Amino acid sequence: MDRYKVVILWSEGDQAYLAEMPELPGCMADDATQEQALQIVRETAHLWMQTAQEIGRPIPAPDTSEFMLRAG
């Protein structure tokens, strides 16, 4: 699970941090803190993968390329 990228952004409209694992479509979470958003999206990813296995959907491999996100 730690090999999957997590993108965390602040949402003014939601007044919360949004965390997403881009390789796992729809795997997102939000919370008032970055730490909580990260923890929740990791839990969500675990459930995402468990559900994918149960219904026979392939689980994408983690993207191993490196990237850096800079807020402007």
Image (cartoon, rainbow, N blue to C red):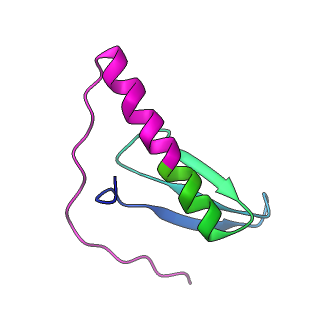
Corner quadrant of residue 15: bottom right
The image position of residue 48, as x and y in percent, is 44, 34
The image position of residue 4, as x and y in percent, is 33, 56
Residue sitting at 39 percent across and 42 percent down? Answer: 24
The image position of residue 23, as x and y in percent, is 34, 47
Residue sitting at 43 percent across and 61 percent down? Answer: 6
Q: In the shown orientation, is residue 52 left or right of residue 39?
A: left
42 shown above or below 70: above
Give, as a single range, the part of the protein colored magenta.
Answer: 43-72
Give the total number of marks visible in the rendering.
Answer: 0
Residue 2 at least partly seen: yes
30 shown above or below 34: above
Residue sitting at 52 percent across and 42 percent down? Answer: 44
Q: Is residue 56 magenta?
A: yes
Q: In the shown orientation, is residue 11 left or right of residue 1?
A: right
In the rendered image, which quarter contains the C terminus? Answer: bottom right
Q: Is residue 51 magenta?
A: yes
Residue 27 at least partly seen: no
